[in-house]
Amino acid sequence: MARERGRGEVFGRRAALLAGGKFVILSALGVRLYSLQVLEAQRYRDMAEDNRVNFRLLEPTRGYIVDRYGAPLAVNVQSYRLEIRADLTPDLPATLDALGRLIEIPAKERARILQAVKKSRRIFLPVTVKENLTWEQVSRVEVNAPDLPGVDIKAHETRLYPYGDATAHVVGYVSAVNEDDLEADDDPLLELPSTRIGKFGIERQYELALRGRAGRKEIEVNALGREIREFPERRIEAEPGHDIVTTIDLALQRFIIDRLADQHAAAVAVMDVNNGDVLALVSTPTYDANLFPKGISPGAWQDLVNNRYKPLTNKVVAGQYAPGSTFKLIVMLAALEAGIGPGLTNHCSGFIQLGDRKFHCWKRWGHGTLDMLGSIRESCDIYYYELSQKLGIERIAEMARRLGLGSPTGVDLGGERPGNIPDSDWKQAVVGDHWRPGDTVVAGIGQGYVEATPLQLAMMTARIVNGGKAVTPRLTRDLFVADKVSARPDPEFPSIGVENYSLVMVKKAMQQVVNHEKGTARGSRLVDSAWTMSGKTGTSQVRRITAAERRKRVLKNEELEWLMRDHALFVAFAPFKSPRYAVAVVVEHGGSGSKAAAPVARDIMLEIEKREQQFVSGEWPAQVALSDIRDRR
């Protein structure tokens, strides 16, 4: 009996423990059910809604880019793109095999697609299979759509540059988004396969303004993720990008490119001397910007990269050249400001001796005795060897910087180089040597360590002839900060701090360069024109002429291999009495400024004058307003 009673007590305790355990478990389940169904009900309702409702980004229309008269430089055209979504494709390789029987998919492209799917941050984002489908390709895919799960054809806008070769260095181009772009910008729009962003030129400089803002639509999807319907009341339309009106005159731009067709490589900048508008910015050779939005082929890219004349380089802002004798304008201005009068004379016998070195004039037998205006008119090197020694490099460098050399101009275009205006501190810091008298002599004629871009030379000319205002170049008629646009106020440029008398004397010397019978650019004067062009020739050496060559015979440029020929330069302004336009021309290895560069500037000025007459007579349209651009679409 005692044993049975003991067993009963053990069984009772076990039953009580089991019942208690069940009660605890049931209580926990009850609490969890209460939490799920009452306390967290809204959360799970939202999660269920998220599984049922998906968001799709709506691409904004990229802003247009036009010239000052409204001519299109960058627009959008409709195109068709083939996409595939990995999350809706049960067997991606098999689907690609099926697609490959309808349209050509090279092995490299297939590998790219598979890699893109693997690396995609969001599995529901489509991956591009092929861009710019033809109608025949579209019809093939659409007919076989039931057998191609996850495959879709989307209509979208592609960037088009109607004058892609004429404006490539100004407008630039858009191209596909890469990993670096995604890391630098968290805009989800960049993850869409159709998105193209500015990689060069104005397209890059004003990317945020041109891009616009993505919209959003909400759609109901089934368990497979396929779209069932859209909720139109929840749709947020995309905001189109801002249109941009440039200061460029497209017709003038194209005229200059045609004018330079006989040169291997050249750069031209045309500026309004009063407000800084850049009417033309030409770098040759150029390239077709339309190669990039659709994806440039490896072969075409290698052709551009390996071209000896560097078509991808915007030589107007990134080409740094010794300014040669155009720099003498700065030395003359520095001398006048230092109190040296224009009547100062020097005798040129063809060379000067400085220590154990001879410094030669470009005219072998010399110019004889010249005053300051004559030294510019005939471009005497000896005069500026002597004058630069009187001034010293510090005064020359200080005047060069006032006129905008030695630092970027600030033009609203990327890739600008600063050029170089050396002085004693610069040489010590960069070269590790002290400044020598010979350095000053060479700098005085714009050689040695002195470098400038064509746009800087145009700005230098503009500051000399506009009364000493520190004008800076601009390529757009409106201001854009991030994605905000506002009207550009009338320019108010500060003074460069130079006496008007000094500026007048330099202008007078430039007038003689072109129009005096002994001027180095007399052959390029404007004939049968109401305007008078003034300017300064320049020829900068790219090789050193040895003493042995001078004793025998200095080879002419046309006798040398192209890369060994001198650069040809010319800066000019017109009209003389009321200056409005400044032009800088650099012809790489063109020989002499008077023969290769000055005639180009002459023809540009004649074209500008002709266009002004057409404008006055009503044959040329008025400049377009930014608000008018969208109405023209």
Image (cartoon, rainbow, N blue to C red):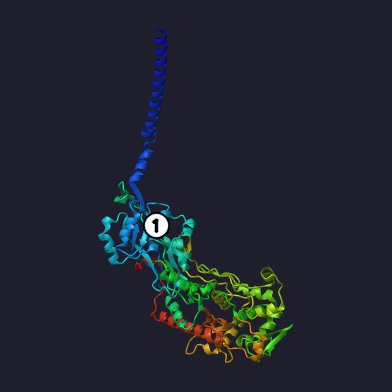
Q: Position of residue 25 (x, y in %)?
A: 40, 26
Residue 182: % across, % down:
46, 57
Quarter occupied by residue 456: bottom right
Q: Quadrant of the C terminus?
A: bottom left
The answer to whether residue 315 is left or right of residue 8 is right
Q: How many numbered markers are drawn?
A: 1
Residue at image location 43% in from the left, 52% down from the top: 121
Q: Is residue 275 above or below residue 52?
A: below
Residue drawn 47% across and 77% down? 285
Q: Residue furthest right?
A: 355
Q: Residues within 10 Å of mark 1 (few under 14, many from 20)?
A: some
Q: Which residue is mark 1?
A: 114
Depth check, front residue: 531 or 303: 303
Dot 1: element: helix
8 or 208, which is in the foreground? 8
* Disc 1 residue type (three-letter): Leu
Q: In this rendering, is residue 125 above or below 413?
A: above
Hey, which quadrant is residue 519 in on the image? bottom right
The residue lying toward the viewer, choosing from 105 and 244, is: 105
